Amino acid sequence: MSSRLSGMTGFARADGAAEGWTWSVEARSVNGRSLEVRFRGPPGFDGLERTAKRSAQARLHRGQVNLGLQARRAASGGADIRIDEGLLDRYLELANHLAERGAVPPSADGLLALRGVVEAGEDDLDTEARERLEMAMAETLDQALAALKTSRDAEGAALAPVIVGFIDRIETLTAQAETEAGTQVEAIRARFARRMAELAPEAPGLDERIVLEAAALATKADVREELDRLTAHVASARALLQQAPAGRKLDFLMQEFMREANTLCSKSATTALTGIGLELKAVIEQLREQVQNVE
């Protein structure tokens, strides 16, 4: 069965050049309950952050996404570079204070990479050239995000057969539980009869009382509803594999799976049915761990 699952972990890179500038974009993502996009770019290109976030939101639904754009202007350019000495001094003071507490001392390139320390002066680009430059950078951001989506889709394709295997196992165990549940009434009746015979071997009307008590206990131990719901959940899980995004709904479905498995174990009157219920819980937990990676 094919699947439309997408993962939340991925990496992509894209490069570009225009108007005497060169740049590279790296896009990384990891698991997250919702979509969180963080962008870091060169000074003077703050507008690209909005573009990057819109592009990410158009493609992705969940996960923590980090976008980094590093840009360099050709040496022949007319832009001047200025160091904000006051800000750098404050960073150094804080870094030295942390170093006294055991932190790693800062490096020069690390300090210069901090936002606001290095400022570029006015370049010689006119308005139209700068607009073309930002449009070209935005296109590279879009390319990196498209490649990131491809990477996450590949993770989803790898997860799909693993998830399907767990769902198949849950379906098999549910069928086994249904077969075993058919023996519960007789097991309860035999157990109750032994107890009654031990406690009141000469009591009149014992057989009738055994039947009534066994029937009451069998009603409490009836697991047909739990098995019907487990069967329905299996069908729902298979349907969700054809949807995108499916992660949130699968998360919720795992809770429903576990609830039915817990009730099945609590109602079990035989060792065999309890064993099936415990294995069900183990498989559902393994499935839940995999579902955490699904967008």
Image: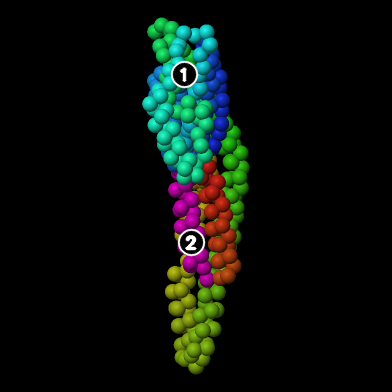
Q: Where residue 265 sits in the image (x, y, percent)?
A: 51, 65
The residue sitting at the bottom extreme is 202
Q: Is residue 193 left or right of residue 89?
A: right
Measuring 54% from the left and 54% from the top, which residue is drawn there?
285
Q: In this orientation, which residue lies closer to the viewer: 190 or 30?
A: 30
Q: Where residue 221 sits in the image (x, y, percent)?
A: 47, 69
Q: Which mark is residue 262?
A: 2
The amino acid type, in three-letter code, at marker 2 is Asn
Measuring 50% from the left and 93% from the top, which residue is drawn there?
202
Total numbered badges shown on the rendered structure: 2
Q: Is 251 colored magenta in this rendering? A: yes
Estimate how packed mark 2 is, as few (under 14), some (14 to 19) or many (20 or more) residues with alpha carbons within 10 Å. Answer: some
* Residue 175 seen in render: no
Please name the residue that numbered disc 1 is placed on: 138
Q: Tell me: residue 179, above or below residue 81.
A: below
Q: Which residues are magenta?
A: 246-269
Q: Main secondary structure of the magenta part?
A: helix
Q: Secondary structure at mark 2?
A: helix
Measuring 47% from the left and 58% from the top, which residue is drawn there?
260
The amino acid type, in three-letter code, at marker 1 is Ala
In the figure, residue 52 lies in which quadrant?
Answer: top left
Q: Where residue 115 sits in the image (x, y, percent)?
A: 42, 27
Q: Is 59 colored magenta in this rendering? A: no
